[in-house]
Image (tube, rainbow, N blue to C red):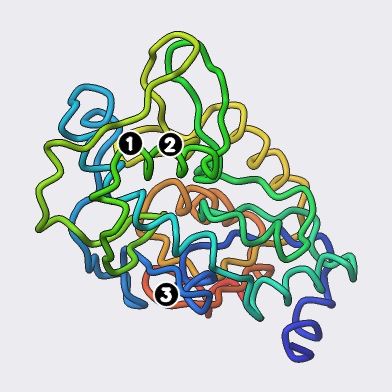
Amino acid sequence: MQAIISLLSAHKDWFVLTGAGVSAASGVPTYRNSDGIWQRKPPVTHQEFMAEQSSRRRFWSRNMVGWRFMIDAQPNSAHLALVKLQQLGLVSCLVTQNVDGLHQRAGSKAVIDLHGRVDSVSCMACGHKYSRASLQTWLETQNPEYALLAGGIAPDGDADIDHLDYSEMQVPDCEHCGGILKPDAVFYGDSVPKDRLLLAEQKLRQANGLVVAGSSLMTYSGYRFVSGHSSKANLFCCLMKAKQEQMTSRHLK
């Protein structure tokens, strides 16, 4: 920890971007390994979720099981180290690609959740919001046979239970208008909300440098910050593998 502080203290106002690797030690799996190689079945896409009842059944059956793991996950030393750096005034903005809320639970302030959060749910028709925890009771009550299932935890509150029949799974609808309920996370095939992206880009322009922690940068949502940061050479630090390995020596003194 002291070595990291010493490295970053030469220049304050760091923009920090974190990815799934930061939460791995908390027991939250990643879609890719440390070399950036995809290692899981494709998740339900935004288009599939919105168009197909069968996809929503698949999603909610897996999510009902995976949610138990998510609520038990606790911040790890990486989350706490970033809290410390923020308290020391070294970090001016923390942007995360993670949807687990562990940065906030650790104590980080003003976090920009680039891909949203899985602990809240919205109606896609009327916009009414629900807590994900409140839906768990409904899901388990309406699906008692699925409530007894156990599966291996997967990324983003998912679970590995695809071998089971979920055709009878009862999925929640909005109690106000009957609309489709969807977690407030950016699914694959969807885009980061424009206002959220503009805020992050503004913070990056104001920062003195960029730190990437726990991200393979294999998706454009994260890589865009690095590709547009070349004007701030020598103020770039990477703390993982994959794409950014080639950038570290070029940008970090």
**Residue at the spot 50% in from the left edge and 26% down from the top edge:** 122
Query: Mark 1 touching mark 2, by CB under 8 A?
Result: yes
Q: Residue furthest bottom?
A: 3
Labels 3 and 1: the sequence-earlier one? 1
In the displayed structure, would residue 213 be above or below residue 133? Answer: below
**Residue at the spot 63% in from the left edge and 52% down from the top edge:** 95
Q: Are there few (<14), some (14-19), or many (20+) residues within 10 Å of tag 1?
A: some
Residue designated by label 1: 142
> Which SS class for mark 1?
helix
Q: CA distance from mark 1 to mark 2?
A: 6 Å
> Which SS class for mark 3?
helix
Give the image location of residue 86, x and y in percent.
82, 65
Pick the front one: 81 or 7: 81
Give the image location of residue 202, x and y in percent.
70, 38
Pick the front one: 229 or 105: 105
Left or right of 98: which side holds 94?
right
Left or right of 234: which side holds 181?
left
- Give the residue type that dot 1 points to: Gln
Give the image location of residue 48, x and y in percent.
21, 31
Residue designated by label 2: 138
Q: Are there few (<14), some (14-19), or many (20+) residues within 10 Å of tag 2?
A: some
